[in-house]
């Protein structure tokens, strides 16, 4: 047996306590919306965490306060489309996570220890060519918190230790799990389009087409019509395991 196959890959669809942590409003929907809707339909409890206020996510000059409020309303509407769940805003400034990494890490530890999830979803910080510092910074903070969540002396002010959850990276170049989302893909798109400040009609057409084509390619790999893809790892993959990238 190859070394990369020695550690089993957690079964994402068996998880019933799910924590989806996004850098910005809309990221969870773009990366995993159809899977989150499917998990909710299967009876899972999904809680949502958004790290930043999304205040610079516009091509137009705008009042920061009004955009923050708009993006909050859009995020709440998107969650309602996908089936609901608790929503926690960490409140960090958009494009500001790398400058407040220590505070972010503490907040993520607290979110994970409070929810005690079976799995945490977040962007893959190792995705090649990912230019957004918030995505890279959040992905690494979540990875660190997942892998250290059971050590009481690590971030002791952020709650008591919990059993380490699995982690499922979306936006990954090395997926090992493909979820059949044939029945929930349109629900994902409806949730995305509630973020009207981010996705105007031309963008909806282009992005919607790309995501559907990509989902069809992932689906072909899994023998289904449409799929979302993830890199799912256990805590054992996250330290001193050089085969994790190909597991």
Image (cartoon, rainbow, N blue to C red):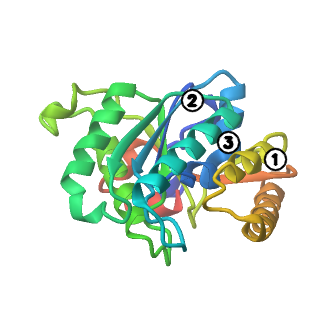
Residue 166: percent from the left, percent from the top? 46, 39
Discs 3, 2 touching: Cβ within 8 Å: no
The location of residue 25, given as percent across then percent down, is 52, 51
Q: Residue at x 31, y 29 (%)?
A: 113
Instruction: Decide if residue 232 is in sight here.
Output: no
Q: Label 3, on which residue?
A: 35
Q: Which mark is residue 186?
A: 1
Q: CA distance from mark 3 to mark 2?
A: 12 Å
Tell me the SS state at disc 2: loop
| Label 2 sits on residue | 15
Q: Please name the residue shown 81% across and 60% down the image.
A: 212
Local SS, label 1: helix
Q: Mark 1 or mark 3: which comes first in sequence? A: 3
Mark 3 or mark 2: which comes first in sequence? 2
Crowd around label 1: few <14 · some 14–19 · many ≥20 (10 Å): some
Q: Give the foreground label among 3 and 2.
A: 3
């Amino acid at each position: 047996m190859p070394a990369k196959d020695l550690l089993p890959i957690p079964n994402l669809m068996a998880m019933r306590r799910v924590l989806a942590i996004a850098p910005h409003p809309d990221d969870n929907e773009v990366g995993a919306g159809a899977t989150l809707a499917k998990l909710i339909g299967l009876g899972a409890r999904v809680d949502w965490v958004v790290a930043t206020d999304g205040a610079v996510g516009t091509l137009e000059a705008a009042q920061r306060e009004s955009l923050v409020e708009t993006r909050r309303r859009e995020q709440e509407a998107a969650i309602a489309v996908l089936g609901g769940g608790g929503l926690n805003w960490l409140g960090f400034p958009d494009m500001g996570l790398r400058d407040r990494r220590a505070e972010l890490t503490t907040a993520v530890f607290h979110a994970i220890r409070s929810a005690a999830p079976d799995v945490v979803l977040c962007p893959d910080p190792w995705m090649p060519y990912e230019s957004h510092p918030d995505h890279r910074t959040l992905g690494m903070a979540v990875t660190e918190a997942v892998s250290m969540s059971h050590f009481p002396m690590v971030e002791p002010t952020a709650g008591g230790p919990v059993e380490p959850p699995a982690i499922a990276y979306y936006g990954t170049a090395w997926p090992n799990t493909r979820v059949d989302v044939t029945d929930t893909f349109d629900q994902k798109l409806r949730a995305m389009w509630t973020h009207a400040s981010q996705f105007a009609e031309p963008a909806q057409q282009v992005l919607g087409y790309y995501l559907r084509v990509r989902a069809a390619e992932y689906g072909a790999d899994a023998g289904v019509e449409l799929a979302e893809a993830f890199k799912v790892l256990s805590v054992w993959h996250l330290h001193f395991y050089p085969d994790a990238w190909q597991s």
